[in-house]
């Protein structure tokens, strides 16, 4: 790893980070307003800046074959995970984290849906992996309750309230019949032998 390569990587990372911040800070502003380049105060943008910085730096590390390339990748993935976590736990209005309160979901509708089931027997090898699975008996239809709901949240600091995505939840999934399990002493042929 040469100093010139390291300098190129850091310079490119800083430029990419500034461009990313510029785009995110000004995505909702009108075109007639004066555009100022300033450091972000939003925890999401700060974390995103570091993720972009180390992402570009890792590309340079890969291209030039730096010795510490793997560490840069790990740091980048860490900042990506932190950025996603902040985005999911941040108030959309005041941008503060650790202030999100989850409320009971809003129930939009409930309906009955058929679930087709056939009794089955699962045979296991001695190591617990599946040897085979056989279905037997007549097919039964079990009616299950499906609830469509939307999560609701509020901010404990600014009291802003918002709604999450709509999703379905099966209220009877845990009640589905389980297969019959048969354990055997037969060794799994794919298991490597120990000498």
Image: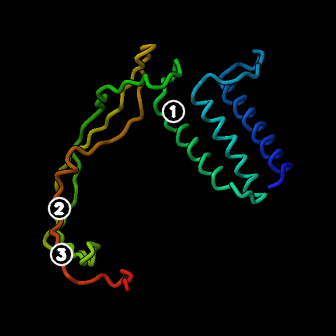
Disc 1 to disc 3, C-alpha distance: 46 Å
Label 2 secondary element: loop
Q: Residue at x 27, y 83 (%)?
A: 187
Q: Residue at x 72, y 46 (%)?
A: 56
In the rendered image, residue 84, in percent from the top left (x then y), is placed at: 52, 38
Instruction: Give the vertical position of 152 relative to 1 (above or below).
Output: above
Q: Nearer the viewer, mark 2 or mark 1?
A: 1
Q: Dividing the image into 4 quarters, which one contains the C terminus?
A: bottom left
Q: 33 and 181: which one is in front?
A: 181
In the rendered image, residue 75, in percent from the top left (x then y), is placed at: 60, 46
Instruction: Give the vertical position of 143 relative to 31 (above or below).
Output: below
Say which residue label 2 marks.
Answer: 178
Q: Dividing the image into 4 quarters, which one contains the N terminus?
A: bottom right
Say which residue label 3 marks.
Answer: 183
User: Earlier along the polypeptide chain: callout 1 or callout 3?
Assistant: 1
User: Earlier along the polypeptide chain: callout 3 or callout 2?
Assistant: 2
Q: 89 and 119: which one is in front?
A: 89
Label 1 secondary element: helix
Label 3 secondary element: strand
Residue 120 position by quadrant:
bottom left
Q: Within 10 Å of the Cα at label 3, are there few (<14), some (14-19), or many (20+) other Cα atoms?
A: some
In the rendered image, residue 40, in percent from the top left (x then y), is placed at: 66, 24
């Amino acid at each position: 790893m040469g100093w010139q390569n390291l300098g190129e990587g850091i310079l490119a990372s800083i430029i990419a980070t500034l461009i990313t911040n510029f785009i995110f800070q000004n995505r909702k502003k009108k075109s007639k307003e004066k555009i100022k380049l300033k450091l972000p105060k939003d925890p999401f943008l700060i974390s995103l800046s570091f993720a972009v910085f180390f992402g570009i730096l890792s590309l340079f590390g890969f291209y030039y074959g730096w010795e510490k390339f793997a560490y840069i990748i790990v740091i980048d993935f860490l900042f990506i995970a932190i950025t996603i976590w902040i985005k999911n736990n941040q108030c959309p209005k005041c941008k503060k984290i650790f202030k999100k309160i989850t409320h009971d979901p809003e129930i939009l509708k409930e309906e009955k849906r058929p679930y087709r089931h056939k009794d089955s027997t699962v045979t296991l090898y001695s190591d617990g992996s599946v040897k085979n699975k056989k279905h037997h008996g007549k097919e039964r239809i079990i009616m299950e309750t499906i609830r469509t709901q939307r999560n609701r949240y509020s901010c404990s600091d600014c009291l802003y309230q918002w709604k999450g995505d709509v999703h379905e939840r099966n209220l009877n999934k845990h009640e589905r019949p389980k297969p019959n399990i048969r354990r055997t002493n037969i060794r799994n042929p794919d298991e490597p032998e120990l000498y």
